[in-house]
Amino acid sequence: MGHRPDIEPSAGAGGFFACPDGSALPLIGLAHGSRHPGVAASIDQLMLATGAAGGMPAVGAFLDLAEPDLPTVARRLADLGHRAAVVAPLLFTEAFHARVDVPEAVREASASSGLQLVTAAVLGTSDDMLEVVEQSMTAAGVGNAHSVVLLAVGSSRSEANDAVLDLAARLERRRTGRVVAAFGTRSPRVAEVLDGLPEPTAIVPLFLSPGLLLDPLEELAASRGMVMAAPLGDLVAPLLVRRYQRALLTAAPQLR
C-alpha cells in the first residue's frame, strides 16, 4: 500500500485549538479506499501537503479496501498523547459513505481509542471545489474551447449525483466549451456522452487519487487523442485546511 508517514505532533498553528503540548489538533483525512496500488501514496501526499499548509499534524485513513482504517489511526494518535482530532471525510457528495459509513467509523474509532473526534464537512461541490477543478484543467492543458467530461464515481442517491450535475453546469457557465457530467458506476458513463460532444475533448476526474475506475479511461483518452486531467490530489489541500478550521470553530464549546 505504500509508505505511510509517522504521526508526530507538530508545531502549533496560531488561533487553532491546541493539544496539551501546544500543538494543533491533528487532522485525519478519511478516504473511501481502493485496491489500486497508487491510492495510499496519493492520500499520504495530500495529507502531507495539508499539514504543511495548515500547520497541523495530518494523516490519512480509509473506510475500506486500504489500510490503515480510522480506529487504527485514532489509537495511534491517542498513544502519542492526543486527546482529540478532526476527521475530514475526503468525499465530494453527501452520499451513503458520508451519511452512514463515516459516522459509524467515527463512533467506532472514538470508542476504541478514547479520542474525541470532531467530524468536518465533506469536500463537497461548492464554489471552492469548482475553482480546484479549474486549476486541474489548467494544469492538464484543457483549453477554454475543449468539451469537458466531468467524471465522478456516482451514487445510488440521486441528490449526490445531482450535486455533480450542478457542478458541471456551473463550470460550463464559466467556459466556452461544453461541460457534461459522467459517472464511473452508473449512467451516463463516459462512453455514453463522448460522441455527442464537439472536439477537442477532455476528461476531468472528480477523484483525489488514482483508481481502478480511472485506468481504462486513461487508455481510452490516449487512444482517442483526448486530454485527461490528473486526479485532484494536492490541489484540495487548501480546502481541507478550511474544512478543518470550520470544524474546530463549530466544535469550540466541546473542545475548550
Image (cartoon, grey):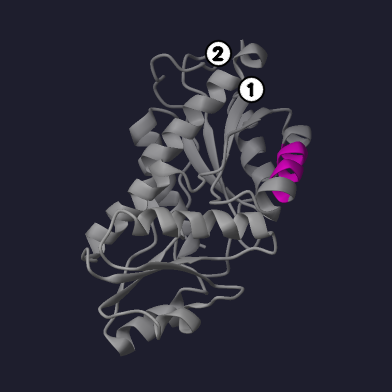
Find residue 102 and report its horizontal and vertical position in percent: 69, 45
State the residue position of label 1: 83
Residue type marked 1: Arg
The residue sitting at the bottom extreme is 223
Secondary structure of the residue carrying tag 2 is: loop
Whether pointer 2 and pointer 1 mark residues with C-beta atoms closer than 8 Å, the reply is yes
The magenta region covers 101-109
* Rendered residue at 58%/57% (across/down): 162
Tell me residue 55's x, y (percent): 38, 27
Residue at 57 percent across and 37 percent down: it is 121
Indicate whether residue 104 is drawn in magenta. Answer: yes
Vertically, is 132 above or below 27?
below
Q: Which residue is mark 2?
A: 20
The answer to which quarter of the image holds residue 148 is bottom left
In the image, residue 113 lies in the stretch drawn in magenta: no
| Along the line of sight, the residue nearer the viewer: 244 or 20 | 244
Q: How many angstroms separate mark 2 from mark 1 (CA)?
A: 8 Å
